[in-house]
Image (cartoon, rainbow, N blue to C red):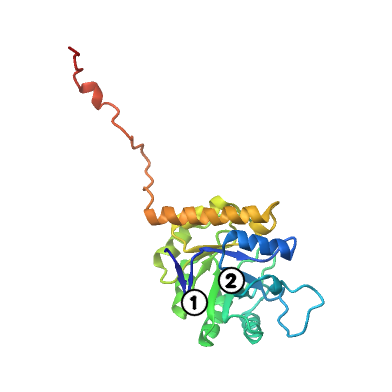
């Protein structure tokens, strides 16, 4: 089986799913099931990490930890210090010592801060966290992060929630070529065809949230993304034909004209 290895875990699914923006937690649960994902991201700002019952519904009650690896994320952190504090809080609450590192002080475009991300990665890796950093499609930063001990690199295809797909394809190609850790495309994937394109490029996985959560039928679209990821990975493994500028005929265009006709007796 074509499994994905991240740190000490093996995954059969290469589709990761986020849990924000769903119309209800019940709908989120059904969509996660339809996606066949095995890794689910949860914003620490949306989860009840205390031991006390929450008067509001706790999203963690709807995510089976025996079925999914729960990946806490630090969305909302503006600095390395804030992200590190959130990661430690998640560990203290008993969540897996895995962290999706998101630091984006610009709240309009939600672009990740490269300096703070590298700083936080170095600290969290030293504390034995499995760190999956969300980054711009920057090949130099990706290499610095993997050298610092990041378990994956997660370049954005386009800004979070934009649904614009793989706008940074050329830079992502370089990241994939140079990577010694899995490359997960995170953010901007708005259509199943975008996910297929990312996987055909050689990405190891994709993370989808907004496109599924805000669709008119999250369950059906989650299933469609699942199929799209499988199709793209299969195509990549088989090997796609190279693109050419000139046409390449599938059969001879003129050779038969020089052949002498056979006379029937």
Residue 67, disc: 2
Q: Nearer the viewer, mark 2 or mark 1?
A: 2
Q: Is residue 63 above or below residue 192?
A: below
Furthest residue toward top: 265
Residue 156 is situated, as x and y percent measured from the top left of the image, at 56, 63
Quarter of the picture containing the N terminus is: bottom left
Q: Which residue, given by chain and number where applicable, does mark 1 sit on?
A: 150
Q: Nearer the viewer, residue 141 or 252?
A: 252
Residue 81 is situated, as x and y percent measured from the top left of the image, at 63, 83
Furthest residue toward right: 55
> Would residue 127 be found to the left or right of residue 45 on screen?
left
Q: Nearer the viewer, residue 246 or 179?
A: 179
Quarter of the picture containing the C terminus is: top left
Secondary structure beneath label 2: loop
Q: Is residue 200 above or below residue 120?
A: above
Q: Nearer the viewer, residue 8 or 205?
A: 8
Residue at the image position 19 percent from the left and 17 percent from the top: 262
> Would residue 96 be found to the left or right of residue 170 on screen?
right
Residue 161 is situated, as x and y percent measured from the top left of the image, at 65, 59
Secondary structure beneath label 1: loop
């Amino acid at each position: 089986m074509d499994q994905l290895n991240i740190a000490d875990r093996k995954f059969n699914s290469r589709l990761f799913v986020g849990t924000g923006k769903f119309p209800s937690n019940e709908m989120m649960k059904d969509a996660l099931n339809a996606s066949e994902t095995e890794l689910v991201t949860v914003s620490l700002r949306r989860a009840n990490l205390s031991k006390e019952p929450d008067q509001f519904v706790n999203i963690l009650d709807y995510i089976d930890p025996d079925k999914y690896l729960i990946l806490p994320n630090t969305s909302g952190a503006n600095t390395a210090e804030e992200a590190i504090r959130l990661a430690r809080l998640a560990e203290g609450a008993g969540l897996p010592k895995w962290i999706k590192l998101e630091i984006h002080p610009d709240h309009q475009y939600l672009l990740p801060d490269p300096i703070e991300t590298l700083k936080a990665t170095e600290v969290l890796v030293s504390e034995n966290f499995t760190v999956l950093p969300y980054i711009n499609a920057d090949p130099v930063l990706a290499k610095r992060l993997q050298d610092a001990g990041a378990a994956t690199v997660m370049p954005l295809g386009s800004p979070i929630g934009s649904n614009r797909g793989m706008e940074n394809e050329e830079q992502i190609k370089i990241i994939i070529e140079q990577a010694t850790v899995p490359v997960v495309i995170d953010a901007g994937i708005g259509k199943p065809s975008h996910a297929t394109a990312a996987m055909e490029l050689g990405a190891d996985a994709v993370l989808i949230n907004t496109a599924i959560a805000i669709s008119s039928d999250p369950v059906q679209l989650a299933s469609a993304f699942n199929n799209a990821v499988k199709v793209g990975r299969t195509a990549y493994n088989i090997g796609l034909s190279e693109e050419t500028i000139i046409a390449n005929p599938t059969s001879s265009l003129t050779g038969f004209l020089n052949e002498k006709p056979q006379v029937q007796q």
